[in-house]
Image (spheres, coloured by chain):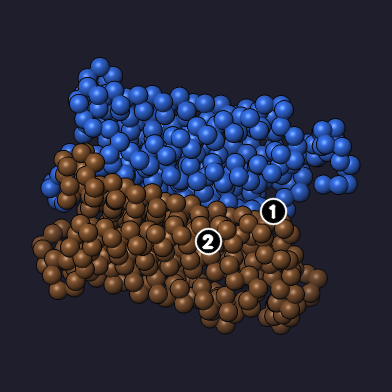
Chain colours: A brown, B blue
Amino acid sequence: MESPAGGAPAPRALPYYVALSQLLGLTAVATTGAWLGLYRGGIAWESALQFNVHPLCMVIGLIFLQGDALLVYRVFRNETKRTSKVLHGALHVLALVLALVGLVAVFDYHGRQRYADLYSLHSWCGLLVCGLYFAQWLLGFGFFLFPGASFSLRSRYRPQHVFCGAAIFLLAVGTALLGLQEALLFKLGAKYRALEPEGVLGGALGLLLAGFGAAVLYILTRAGWRRPPREEEQALSMDFKTLTEGGGPGSQ
Amino acid sequence: MESPAGGAPAPRALPYYVALSQLLGLTAVATTGAWLGLYRGGIAWESALQFNVHPLCMVIGLIFLQGDALLVYRVFRNETKRTSKVLHGALHVLALVLALVGLVAVFDYHGRQRYADLYSLHSWCGLLVCGLYFAQWLLGFGFFLFPGASFSLRSRYRPQHVFCGAAIFLLAVGTALLGLQEALLFKLGAKYRALEPEGVLGGALGLLLAGFGAAVLYILTRAGWRRPPREEEQALSMDFKTLTEGGGPGSQ
């Protein structure tokens, strides 16, 4: 079960943890929708409801889809590397598009209402997440999708890519909690202290988001749950290394 | 450098990352002190300033000392396991004591001012951190300091202990950011939007705390930076395993 060697069967506990993560993530998305529908008047682009597009897009894109993109190599462990890579990239494209829509929504709303931008800790962390996410996109694309990068360059960059991906995801979860509490404090004010239904629902949503973050981190960090390289991939990457760098198969 | 085998030299980049983490952590502690001194009237137990004991104790205890406790096995890699264990435990004792003082301060202050308790997302996350930290303490003590646990039980629990420790630490960082933004919003109100100096200092403190969390997580998750077991420890644990479970040295 713990062996990372090629052709190993999927770890027995992995599907249960993946199911738990999806349950937490989907419940968080549904709770965000319920919160916006029940207490914030729903969603629209051409009105004051435009603000509500922001939390919905960010929770679906930068939390749920980004988290699932990180899990692709653990869940689809028996697919070819190419398939996993395409799925990983596709989920990140969807996450990026939703994040951009969410960003435009909040800046557009602030502009129309003549509110200040970028003053709160939530907005600073959000800006950091977006900047890092964009840089991670460019580097990931350059190293892993663009055919020019050498084998050893890819191997050396891979652990950094994995760490930065997890760190950006966790910062996105923290930023969502900050934004959620900010929205509750702005609207409820002193009523927040009276355990209003909206405050309780918001708190539950915060815990769901934190739980999804923890579940994704657990699946990512279990050493035995990494995708084992398939035998033909090992042979292929040796050939690739020999071709691009002149190293022999024994010189890894 | 990447070899986890016994007697390996310390990875060359590790000291720089440890220095960076300490710089970020100590600057965060100093900035918390500066914020409370410059904008919140300082610290006292028997007045309305009692509240200020809460953020200071939590940042020193649950963020800085807890983070450093996690790094002990990476930094003191050439000490005996017993020494590292004692230092890891001692830092966690200090963190626990400070967290308890910080908790008493905020509940006492709320009681005197007749404020409600435990309504915000910050307080819910904080309660979760304290509960998980206490459970982690009990389990860690039971498995690793109490002499009764068997070798295989310890080996099986160790990855869970490491993951839960990191997750609790990261949740503590997130909770600190939530508390910081709550404190800024409560006091500054609409002035928060005008980029008041206190808001900017608070935002910088939030980024420092997040940076410390990221640095600790990076050092913890680099596979090649784990403490390699010393040769005599490997021999000893084999003897221990043989004695307690009857397994031969070859049956690991």
- Asked which quadrant contains residue A239, the reply is bottom right
For label 2, the residue is A19
Task: Name the residue type under label 2.
Answer: Ala
Q: Identify the amino acid type marked 1.
A: Met
Give the residue drawn at x 21%, y 38%. Answer: A193
Q: Is residue B67 left or right of residue A29?
A: right
Protein chain holding label 2: A
Tell me residue A211's x, y (percent).
44, 51
Considering the numbered disc 2 on the image, is that residue within a helix, a strand or a loop? Answer: helix
State if disc 1 and disc 2 touch (CB < 8 Å): no
Q: Is residue B54 above or below residue A43?
A: above
| Nearer-the-camera pick, B86 or B110 | B110
Q: What element does badge 1 sit on?
A: loop
Q: Is residue B231 left or right of residue B4?
A: right
Image point 43% across, 44% down: which residue? B171
Q: A11 above or below B111?
A: below
> x and y percent of residue B68 in the render?
52, 37
- On whether disc 2 and disc 1 are found on a single subunit, the reply is no
Q: Nearer the viewer, mark 2 or mark 1?
A: 2
User: Which of the 4 quarters of the picture holds residue B229?
Assistant: top right
- Disc 2: CA contacts within 10 A as few (<14), some (14-19) or many (>=20): few
Quadrant including the N terminus of chain A: bottom right
Q: Position of residue B228 (x, y in %)?
A: 71, 44
The residue at which mark 1 appears reads as: B1
Which numbered disc covers residue A74? none
